[in-house]
Image (tube, rainbow, N blue to C red):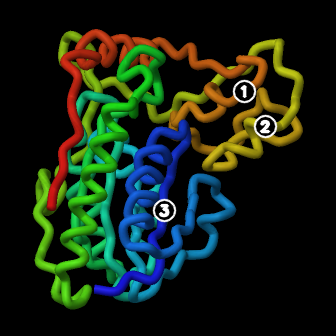
Amino acid sequence: MQINTVWAAYFSATDTTKKVVTQIARRLSQQLQCPMQTFDFTLKHVRKTPKAFAAGDLVVFGTPVYAGRVPNLLIKYVASVQGNGALAVPVVCYGNRNYDDALSELRLTLTAGGFHPVAGAAFSCQHSFSLTQGAGRPDISDLTIATGFADQVYHKVEALPSAEACPPLFVKGNDPVGPYYTPRDRHGNPINILPVKPKTKDTCTQCGRCARECPLEAIDPADAHNIVGKCMKCNRCVRHCPKGAKYFDDPNYLYHKTELEEQYTWPRKEPELFL
């Protein structure tokens, strides 16, 4: 079938989802010989108006995985995006533990929004909490697999007479989706990190970058020490601060981070592809 535009659409606080989605979309654009456009909805002001795609679009749509699901503070926006008959490739990126029901949730949400999912994928990437868990991923191997996946998607799209003729896509995960993953201590007691917010060192120069780049606009632009809204623990402020002034010191957060690193850094999980 004829594709007019390939879209790389993503929420990517620490750029890993961006890398995977862009690699797939760029290759599809080359194979389909049509333009590629980018829709980065990481920042809150971009999400104030629902995005509308069109018939003839092929949208590689990526989100990170938080607690085994699409982030709870993001899912309402994803549900507001209008597919209008476009083809979609749902992609989720997770920190080498498990993506649980995230890919299934994203597929279901995009379908309800008027998309026709044609393929899906889950990629293990560097965890947003950690410098060691999945360090450097997506790496060359992951991006090579992403390119090969795009080639498979291309051949499937080429064989379709129309978007409406796209057969149902089956991916790993429950339908309906299950509960969010709950971190626990070694006695099995739940650990609550939802209220946790980042701290700021004295090395902060009040440059304002963290406030400008916070996906939830939770940081006071006048004082980076002041967290005025909900924090989704995406670690964008920690990774992007030019002075390394942002950090988390909450004991429950640090315990959970250590448990993830000790239990899920290895074995390396490879991309899972669904066509």
Mark 3 vs mark 1, CA separation in Å: 25 Å
Q: Position of residue 28 (x, y in %)?
A: 38, 64
Residue linked to disc 1: 241
Work out whether mark 2 precedes mark 1 in sequence or the reverse, and give the earlier one. Answer: 2
In this picture, residue 181 sits left or right of residue 207:
left
In this picture, residue 223 sits left or right of residue 211:
right
| Neighbourhood count class around disc 2 (C-alpha, 10 Å): few under 14, some 14–19, many 20 upward | some
For the residue marked with disc 2, what is the amino acid?
Arg
Mark carried by residue 61: none
Q: Position of residue 79 (x, y in %)?
A: 40, 71
Is the residue under label 2 in contact with that under label 3 (CB below 8 Å)? no
For the residue marked with disc 3, what is the amino acid?
Ala
Q: Position of residue 222 (x, y in %)?
A: 88, 39
Residue linked to disc 2: 209
| Neighbourhood count class around disc 1 (C-alpha, 10 Å): few under 14, some 14–19, many 20 upward | some
For the residue marked with disc 1, what is the amino acid?
Cys
Above or below 137: residue 39: below
Quarter-of-image position of residue 105: bottom left
In this picture, residue 18 sits left or right of residue 60:
right
For the residues carrying marks 3 and 2, which lies nearer the camera in this image? 3
Residue linked to disc 3: 9
The N terminus is located in which quarter? bottom left
Is the residue under label 1 in contact with that under label 2 (CB below 8 Å)? yes
